[in-house]
Amino acid sequence: ATDFSWLSQGDRILLKLTLNKGNPYPATTDPWAISCMVKLLKEKGAGQIYVGDQSGVESVLWTANDKRGSSRECCESAGLRSVIEESGSTPLFFEEQGYDAYVPAIPDGPHHWDSPIWVTRMVNEVEHIVYLGRVSSHVLGDATLGLKLSVGFLREDSRKAFHQGGENFYAMYEEINQIPQI
């Protein structure tokens, strides 16, 4: 669906996975899609390619003082880590960068967030973000498709605010995608 005119030689790319838990595809991004996309981006001139996510709170729950679970372990048990490494890209798990490795961001235009959204600093360290989603649904959000994939960029406090969004839940996960860095 693109001619890759947006990609310049050497651009850094973040391939954003769907890695909510450690379950294999189809519960996560298709490993074949990861392999193919990395190959295609390299053929088109991409530089460093990071592939990653932060798994959902059922698998990874952490604050400034406490941490439980690991997106790296989820990636391994889902069978994706070896595909990422074999493709020559770099696996990236946002919580491993630390609680303070997040930057405040605000969606463009009107939004339903009461305070800045804390997102991984990686959104500022790459030229492009490519979503590698899956067809999915959510207990609170019905058919979310690829839009809710952006929740993986959030720090724990912003995830909590999002999940407490009540009637604005749908709008809030779409609004994450309106952050200029994303």
Image (spheres, helix red, strand yellow):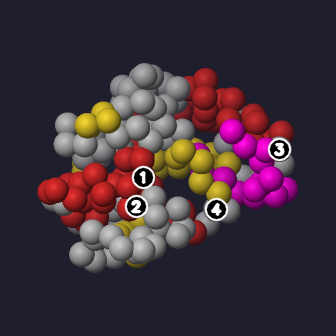
Residue type at numbered disc 3: Lys
Rendered position, 88 above or below 172:
above
Q: Tell me how far mark 4 sits from mark 2, CA to CA.
A: 17 Å
Q: Quadrant of the N terminus?
A: top right
Q: Earlier in the sequence, mark 4 or mark 2?
A: 4
Q: Tell me how far mark 1 sits from mark 2, CA to CA.
A: 6 Å
- Whether residue 11 appears in magenta in the rendering, the answer is yes
Describe the element under mark 2 as helix, strand or loop: helix
Check disc 2 and report the residue beneath it: 176
Mark linked to residue 150: 1
Check disc 3 and report the residue beneath it: 44
Asked whether the residues under the numbered discs 1 and 2 touch, taking CB atoms below 8 Å apart as contact, a structural biologist would say yes
Horizontal relation, residue 72 to residue 10: left or right: left
Residue 113 visible in the current orientation: yes
Describe the element under mark 1 as helix, strand or loop: helix
Measuring from the top left, give residue 74's x and y in whole percent: 38, 35
Which of label 4 and label 1 is nearer to you? Answer: 1
Residue type at numbered disc 2: Ile
Measuring from the top left, give residue 88's x and y in whole percent: 71, 38
Magenta segment's dominant SS is loop
Asked whether the residues under the numbered discs 4 and 1 touch, taking CB atoms below 8 Å apart as contact, a structural biologist would say no
